[in-house]
Amino acid sequence: MAKKKCTFGKFLLVGLIAAAVAAVVAAWKASNPIDDPWTLPAPKPTTLDPVNAPKPATVDEVKNLAKEN
């Protein structure tokens, strides 16, 4: 008498492997960041230095001013 083939067991194993692969792919896709097309671009950083800020005097400039007075 020939042995029966275990087709149900193989079918179940293939189904479990496919389900595991599908779960891994779904988790991987869910962990990726999603770009929102409706978000506004980030504002450009502005400098806080005023345009007409006084610059520090150099040593030579201070010496010249001292000689004049």
Image (cartoon, rainbow, N blue to C red):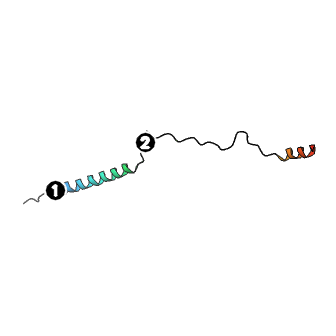
Q: Is residue 50 above or below residue 14?
A: above
SS at badge 1: helix
Mark 2 or mark 1: whose residue is earlier in sequence: 1
Front tag of 2 and 1: 2
Amino acid at circle 1? Phe
Disc 2: which residue: 36
Residue 61: which numbered mark, if any? none
**Residue at position x 23%, y 53% in the image:** 15
Judge from the rendering whether residue 68 lies leftward or rightward of residue 54; answer left or right.
Answer: right
Q: Is residue 33 left or right of residue 16?
A: right
The residue at the point 37 percent across, 50 percent down is 30
Whole-Å distance between the Cαs marked 2 and 1? Answer: 46 Å
Q: Nearer the viewer, residue 60 or 39?
A: 39
Amino acid under disc 2? Asp
Residue receiving disc 1: 8
Query: Do residues under tags 2 and 1 come within 8 Å of each other at their CB atoms?
Result: no
For mark 2, give the secondary structure: loop
Q: How many other residues sit within 10 Å of disc 1, few (<14), some (14-19) or many (≥20)?
A: few
Label total for image: 2
Report the quarter where the N terminus lies.
bottom left
Count neighbours of disc 2 (C-alpha within 10 A) and say few if under 14, some if 14 to 19, many if 20 or more. Answer: few
Residue 69: give x, y in percent of width and height: 93, 45
* Residue under the image location 33 percent in, 50 percent down: 26
Give the x, y percent position of residue 67: 93, 45
Whole-percent x, y for residue 34 in the image: 41, 45
